[in-house]
Amino acid sequence: MQPVKKVVIPAAGLGTRFLPVTKSQPKEMLPVVDKPAIQYVVEEAVRAGLTDVLIVTGRGKHAIEDHFDRNFELEVQLERAGKRALLDAVLNPSEMAAIHYIRQKEPKGLGHAVLTARDHVGDEPFAVMLGDDIMVDDAEVLRSMLDVHARYGRSVVALQEVPRGDISAYGCVEPEPVDDLLVQVRSIVEKPDPTEAPSNLAVIGRYVFTPEIFDALARITPGAGGELQLTDAIALLIESQTVYGWTFEHGRYDIGKKVDFLRANIELALDRDDLGPELEAFLVDLVRRRKLL
């Protein structure tokens, strides 16, 4: 079976939940501690063995391309100053994988963004990773999904339980258990009413697809929000192929949500030897002072 080597990262969204900062800066470039969010996603892909990265961009997203490009003037200055650690940090984004770009010329939705990758992907299985979803799990979920694809030769979506009242913000599946963390997706629906949702298992921003998903994407019509929904294409794919779901509990940050963005910065900084102790002391003191108010 052909191994998965290519990954598509849609990053063309407008980031309206973070306005006004995203008026001039892509939401995928918002810093999480000292790296932009999208770098965490690319690093995860590389850890899982995906070395051919296609980033789907849109208007005003040049900063993403600049970040993964070389900056010779900066590199020379850092080298002359003997700042090797900083030089390595600057070089790493441009050297970690073969990174390509394609522009989604119209904001027609996630399904359309993935469809723009058809010529690049060709007749191969591939992964899709959303550019504003960070998984801090050493790529465990993505590697597990790739293992499922290697075992069954079928598409796999990542699933996480969410409160029933929140399911209307996600794609939602009707699951049939296969084994421990693996389910077969019997049906899937985008942003269902909580009272009608088939479960509280939400589709999270990691996918592994067979190339037949492109045929399904070419057939769908605008769905929820008037956009071409990737969920609707998966529903079509289920009619002709088995689709699996890999469930997980921890490690995900939705950088598109302000609270999750702040939580990611705090929790990831606490894990750093150079930042954690001082930040923890500050937070403990902050909580103490707030209790005294």
Image (tube, rainbow, N blue to C red):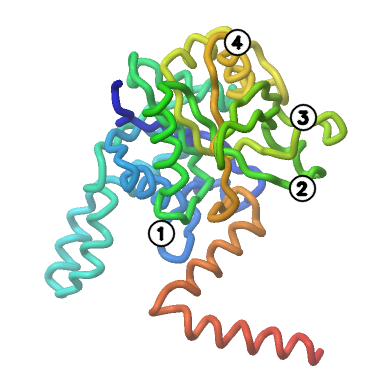
Under circle 4, the secondary element is loop
- 122 displayed left or right of 30: left
Give how far apart the Cα atoms at labels 2 and 4 are.
Answer: 28 Å
Give how far apart the Cα atoms at labels 4 and 3 are.
Answer: 17 Å
Give how far apart the Cα atoms at labels 1 and 3 are.
Answer: 38 Å
Q: Disc 1 or 3, which lies upstream in sequence?
A: 1
Look at label 2 and name its amino acid.
Pro
Q: Is residue 56 visible?
A: no
Q: Is residue 98 above or below residue 69?
A: above
Q: Which residue is mark 2?
A: 163
- Of residue 291 and residue 12, the one placed in the foreground of this image is 291
Q: Which residue is mark 3?
A: 198
Where's residue 226, x and y in %? 70, 20
- Nearer mark to the viewer, of 3 and 2: 3
Q: Residues within 10 Å of mark 3 (few under 14, many from 20)?
A: some
Look at label 1 and name its amino acid.
Lys
Under circle 1, the secondary element is strand
The reply to whether callout 1 and callout 3 are in contact (CB within 8 Å) is: no
Where's residue 244, x and y in %? 54, 28
Where's residue 289, x and y in %? 72, 90
Look at label 4 and name its amino acid.
Glu
Q: Which residue is mark 1?
A: 35
Q: Which residue is mark 4?
A: 239
Under circle 2, the secondary element is loop
Q: How many dots with numbers? A: 4
- Of residue 67 and residue 258, the one placed in the foreground of this image is 258
Q: In which quadrant of the rendered image does the N terminus lie?
A: top left
The reply to whether callout 2 and callout 4 are in contact (CB within 8 Å) is: no
Q: Residues within 10 Å of mark 2 (few under 14, many from 20)?
A: few
Q: Residues within 10 Å of mark 4 (few under 14, many from 20)?
A: few
Q: Measuring 55% from the left and 52% from the top, which residue is drawn there?
A: 252
